[in-house]
Amino acid sequence: MTAASDLPVWAALLTSFLLLLGAGLTLTGAIGLLRLKTFYERVHAPTLGATWGAAGILLASMIYFTVLQARPVLHEVLVAIFVTVTTPVTLMLLARAAIYRDRAEGSSLVPPQTVSETGDRAE
Amino acid sequence: MSAVVLFWSLLIAQFMLGIAMAIAAFRIIRGPRAQDRILALDALYVNAMLLLLLYGMRTGSTLYFEAALVISLLGFVSTVALAKFLMRGEVIE
């Protein structure tokens, strides 16, 4: 925290607001991961941290370093794009795997496979 | 003024992310099934990446950004590999 006293007040307030927003949303998602009942409800909760939680903290970091170094520092966009693109892919794969496992066990949590789905699956 | 505001907001945000990581670790231990553990591991990866970014802001250096990028890449690959393993029983067929 050596260079932070050079920061103008508006930038410090904006950075703090975005930081607290991002961290608070991530914490909310984690509490959802703890408290929701079934896996199919829980799979939604951490996405809160992966979308606006990450976006808030990355925006705060961009504003902080841009103002501090007096030049555009935009490399945080890389992480933002990467996380936003990959999170739906991984969680959909995981949910498909969970449905497959539950169906193989004959669980009552998931509906049985429909005709159109088996038609799609003919590979 | 701005140093004090930033110091406290960074500290509070780090505490929030630390609690979120503890909750994800608890979910990894508790289960109840393998897919819950993988989901919690993915959440743990994202939280660790954000915590590293906060540490970079605290020290005022952009070095930690590369580490955060690598963590997010590894988190994606490991979660996809584990989901594939659950689905098929093998990672590479």
Image (cartoon, grey):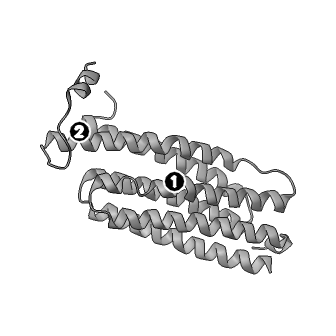
Mark 1 or 2, nearer chain start = 1
Residue lying at 48% horizontally and 45% vertically, measured from the top left: A87
Closer to the camera, B31 or A117? A117
How far, Cα to Cα, is label 1 from label 2? 25 Å
Q: Residues within 10 Å of mark 1 (few under 14, many from 20)?
A: many
Q: Which chain carries label 2?
A: A
Q: Which chain carries label 1?
A: A
Residue lying at 73% horizontally and 78% vertically, measured from the top left: B5
Closer to the camera, B19 or A27? A27
Discs 1, 2: same chain: yes
Residue A27 against residue A77 in the figure, above or below: below
Residue A27 against residue A70 in the figure, above or below: below
Judged from the image, the secondary structure of the residue bearing numbered disc 1 is helix
Residue lying at 65% horizontally and 56% vertically, measured from the top left: A58
Assign the N terminus of chain A to one quadrant of the image: bottom right
Residue A42 visible in image: yes
Residue A50: mark: 1
Contact between marks 1 and 2 (CB within 8 A): the answer is: no
> Where in the figure is residue A19, as x and y percent of width and height?
64, 66
Q: Tell me: A65 left or right of A44.
A: right
Residue A3 visible in image: no
Residue A106 against residue B10 in the figure, above or below: above
Q: Looking at numbered disc 2 in the image, what kind of residue is underneath it?
A: Tyr
Judged from the image, the secondary structure of the residue bearing numbered disc 2 is helix
Write down the residue under mark 2: A100
Q: Tell me: A29 left or right of B5.
A: left
Q: Looking at numbered disc 1 in the image, what kind of residue is underneath it?
A: Ala
> Where in the figure is residue A23, as x and y percent of width and height?
56, 66
Residue lying at 67% horizontally and 46% vertically, measured from the top left: A77
> Where in the figure is residue A102, as x and y percent of width and height?
19, 44
